[in-house]
């Protein structure tokens, strides 16, 4: 009931202390470099020599591996198999089944794509593990992100779990009045339909009330906003951001140069 | 000069023909505690929304007459400025939590961030409001992990930090258990004591009798009665128009019918009822009543 949709793990680490914007720029730069780099081994190198050390420095390695092994790895394996079978590659065949084949080239390309996606997911996972969502959003709104946008992001993280809990309450209530949750699939789907009404209409009423409540607290005020959270933005943060942007630009130049 | 001034106010929601409020005339003095009672559909919530600026600024619809708070007219104001003068809290505490904040302290600061209060003053105001509503020990808890009474006190505190001149409360205890009700009324009482103007819509007559300076009875969008609690709450017009009455008044009225109540006025509080029955019921009279 009290859980929220947030990865954030409260620890004390150099990464946690970085400015949220720096971490966001870092995540984005890693993704861009992994996708733009002209060298085949870049994504793997980024994973081994940047992502893994980062997860250790940030002291979130356990949570990171937990998520990667349980959720991401199965997806990546399926993705690798699909890509290896279906990417075109005129070269030596390694494996063949039902007329479909994996060639050396298609396997190479599939591996690179999977590594790119691994880097992408990993860098954002580390960002979310080390950054409190409201810290990220208040830093972004301080930099000019519209308050409404920040509100939508943050409130969804908290309100969706509340809606799930409410759906569960409605289901339990209907089950106690004889809702069929165990017979054939079609019957169960038919049984779920009447539950959707109360949930959706109930939520719409709630949205209006919540709109009134936040409006009563000056949500649409045109006065300049202030912030309770003080967020550090050191010269090291700024230097790091520029360095990362330089790396991305360098990668882009190399890619154009070498192709 | 009254801080709240409604003159000939009539309001229609959009797409409806029947006005929900009709010809409302109401003046409230600064520091006064006014309770509004009325059966369902009497227009109590709409009156709250009108006072708090949501009708017509949020709901649109058609408002005629004058709505004036602290010398500013509603028509000439915008909602985000209007709410600085009039704070609104309502029934469901859950829906009043912004959802954008992870702790009670931050939740209280939400409104102050929106209106650009400097950080030092923000912290001082939040601490003050938490103390007044007795939630200081909840500062670091998630607003979603609290009980109903605690959540409602957080909702009240979130409005209090804005330091409005007038506080409008729409049935703030209707979803509370007796303990939650007592907690919330404790807060409302201390706010009224501190000199804030309070307009409270409430069904719990015992509580109104205890705190209100004045009671307004609303029926079908019109003001039926407007006066002293001891007069309005004991009026014979209430039961015949579908209003509730305090249990003390009901008991005394029944006693009056049986000839067991000799006081002139019906009671509205426990103390008045005890005093009345003490002087009415002498030992000789009780067998009489049994005979009847």
Image (cartoon, coloured by chain):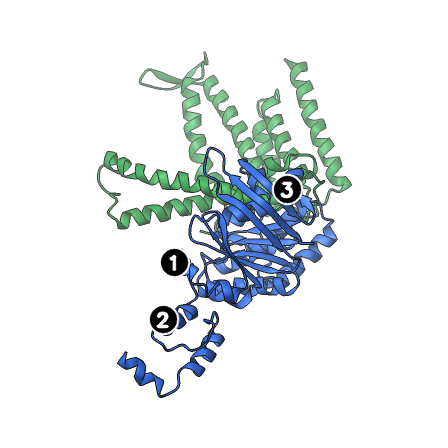
Chain colours: A green, B blue
Q: Which chain is mark 2 on?
A: B
Q: Do the residues labelled 3 and 2 touch (CB within 8 Å)?
A: no
Most extreme residue toward the top is: A90
Local crowd size for mark 2, using a 10 Å CA cut-off: few (<14), some (14–19), many (≥20):
few
- Which of A63 and B72 lies nearest the eye of the viewer? B72
Q: Distance between the residues labelled 3 and 2?
A: 45 Å
Under circle 1, the secondary element is helix
Determine which residue is flagged by label 3: B74
Most extreme residue toward the bottom is: B284
Under circle 2, the secondary element is helix
Residue that appears at 61% across and 26% down: A32
| Residue A34 in sight | yes
Q: Quadrant of the image for the C terminus of chain A?
A: top right
Residue that appears at 28% across and 81% down: B290
Left or right, A196 with respect to A130, comes to: left
Q: Nearer the viewer, mark 3 or mark 2?
A: 2
- Residue B130 x, y percent position in the rendering: 62, 60
- Which of B6 and A151 lies nearest the eye of the viewer? B6
Q: In this view, does B87 lie above or below A236?
A: below
Q: Which of marks 3 and 2 is nearer the N terminus?
A: 3
Q: Earlier in the sequence, mark 3 or mark 1?
A: 3
Determine which residue is flagged by label 2: B254
Q: Which chain is mark 1 on?
A: B
């Amino acid at each position: 009931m009290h859980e929220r949709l947030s990865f954030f793990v409260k620890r004390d680490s150099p990464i946690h202390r970085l400015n949220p914007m720096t971490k966001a720029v870092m995540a984005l730069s890693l993704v861009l470099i992994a996708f733009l780099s002209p060298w085949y081994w870049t994504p793997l190198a980024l994973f081994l020599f940047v992502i893994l050390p980062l997860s250790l420095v940030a002291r979130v390695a356990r949570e990171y591996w937990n998520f990667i092994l349980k959720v991401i790895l199965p997806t990546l394996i399926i993705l690798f198999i699909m890509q290896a079978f279906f990417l075109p590659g005129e070269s030596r065949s390694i494996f063949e089944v039902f007329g479909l084949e994996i060639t050396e080239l298609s396997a190479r390309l599939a591996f690179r794509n999977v590594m790119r996606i691994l880097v992408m997911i990993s860098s954002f996972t580390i960002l979310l593990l080390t950054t409190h969502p409201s810290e990220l959003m208040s830093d972004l709104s301080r930099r000019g992100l519209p308050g409404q946008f920040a509100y939508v992001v943050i409130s969804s993280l908290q309100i969706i779990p509340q809606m799930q809990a409410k759906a569960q309450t409605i289901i339990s209530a209907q089950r106690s009045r004889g809702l069929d949750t165990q017979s054939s699939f079609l019957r169960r789907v038919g049984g779920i339909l009447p539950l959707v009404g109360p949930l959706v209409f109930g939520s719409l009423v709630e949205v209006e009330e919540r709109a009134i409540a936040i409006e009563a607290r000056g949500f649409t005020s045109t006065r300049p906003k202030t912030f309770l959270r003080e967020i550090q933005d050191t010269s090291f943060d700024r230097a790091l951001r520029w360095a990362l942007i330089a790396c991305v630009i360098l990668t882009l130049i190399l890619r154009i140069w070498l192709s | 000069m009254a801080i709240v001034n409604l003159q000939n106010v009539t309001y229609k929601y959009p797409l409806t023909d029947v006005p929900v409020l009709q010809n409302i005339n109401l003046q409230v003095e600064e520091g006064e505690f006014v309770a509004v009672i009325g059966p369902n559909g009497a227009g109590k919530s709409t009156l709250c929304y009108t006072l708090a600026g949501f009708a017509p600024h949020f709901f649109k619809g058609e408002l005629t007459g004058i709505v004036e708070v602290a010398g500013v007219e509603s028509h000439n104001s915008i909602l985000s400025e209007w709410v600085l003068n009039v704070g609104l809290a309502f029934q469901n505490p859950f829906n009043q939590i912004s959802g954008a904040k992870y702790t009670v302290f931050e939740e209280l600061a939400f409104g102050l961030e929106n209106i650009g209060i400097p950080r030092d003053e923000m912290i001082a105001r939040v601490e003050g409001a938490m103390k007044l509503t007795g939630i200081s020990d909840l500062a670091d808890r998630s607003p979603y992990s609290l009980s109903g009474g605690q959540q409602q006190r957080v909702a009240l505190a979130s409005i209090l930090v804005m330091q409005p001149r007038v506080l409008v409360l729409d049935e703030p205890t209707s979803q509370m258990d007796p303990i939650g009700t007592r907690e919330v009324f404790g807060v409302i009482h201390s706010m009224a004591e501190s000199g804030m103007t309070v307009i409270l819509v409430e069904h719990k007559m015992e509580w109104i009798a205890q705190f209100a300076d004045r009671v307004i009875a609303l029926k079908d969008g019109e003001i039926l009665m407007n006066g002293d609690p001891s007069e309005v709450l004991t009026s014979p017009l209430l039961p015949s128009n579908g209003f509730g009455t305090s249990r003390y008044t009901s008991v005394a009225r029944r006693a009056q019918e049986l000839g067991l109540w000799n006081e002139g006025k019906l009671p509205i509080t426990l103390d008045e009822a005890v005093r009345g029955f003490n002087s009415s019921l002498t030992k000789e009279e009780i067998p009489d009543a049994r005979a009847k």
